Amino acid sequence: MTTNGLLFKPAPSFDEPIEMLRACHERIRAQCATLEKLAAYLPSHGADEQAQQAAANIMRYFDVAGPHHHADEEQDLFPMLIEVGRTQRSMSTEWIATLLDEHGTLESEWARLREVLADIAGGHARPLERLRVAGFVYAYRSHIAREETHVFPFADACLSAQQLARLSAAMVARRTVAVPSTR
């Protein structure tokens, strides 16, 4: 299947920060699907090599990219939207307050899941509670749906090119690793 005559959809660049955030949501969905598969896989296979790799990949994503994504929103996107929302008298402040609360809940749930995943990644068979996984995945999917339904369209419609450039620069800076000087 093609997208607009292309064989694949090109990945967005940091020049398109809202599209980058949407792409991150796709990766979160993929990691959540892997987490669900891992929970179903463990009872019959234990912490074999595939389970260890899956657990390590999930941890790597939610330990690095996940916090960057939340920081992109909390430190840069949301404050911009609150500022724009005040001038337009929109509901953005209420949406953002809810999303910030959800970020805290998601991070707490991740910390609990991560403990188990770390053991699995280390080759120690440990049950991954399906109800906890289902709750985490449901919470993330619901959170993403709210952002994609309310926040991202508002950002697309209201942020100026200058604001988008500031958001882009902040996202790049957050992911840039400073190399220590050898002097």
Image (spheres, rainbow, N blue to C red):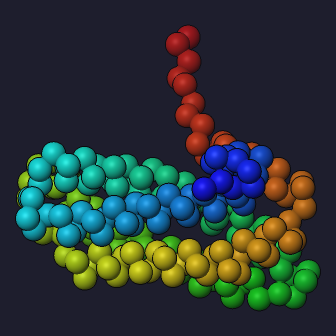
Q: Residue at x 44, y 80 (%)?
A: 139
Q: Which residue is drawn at 11% across and 54% down?
A: 47
Who is closer to the viewer here, 8 or 54?
Answer: 8
Q: Quarter-wise, where is residue 179 in the image?
A: top right
Whether residue 77 sits left or right of residue 131 in the image: it is: right
Can residue 168 be seen in this snapshot? Answer: no
Q: Position of residue 15 (x, y in %)?
A: 77, 46
**14, above or below 155, in the image:** above
Q: Quarter-wise, where is residue 68 in the image?
A: bottom right
Can residue 74 be seen in this snapshot? Answer: yes
Q: Residue at x 56, y 74 (%)?
A: 144
Whether residue 138 sits left or right of residue 20 in the image: it is: left
Q: Where is residue 143 in the image (x, y as percent from the top left)?
A: 53, 78
Q: Position of residue 157 (x, y in %)?
A: 86, 72
Q: Quarter-wise, where is residue 31 in the image?
A: bottom left
Q: Position of residue 44 (x, y in %)?
A: 8, 65
**141, above or below 55, in the image:** below
**173, above or below 68, in the image:** above
In what quadrant of the picture does the N terminus appear? bottom right
In what quadrant of the picture does the C terminus appear? top right
Who is closer to the viewer here, 117 or 82?
Answer: 117
Q: Residue at x 69, y 88 (%)?
A: 94
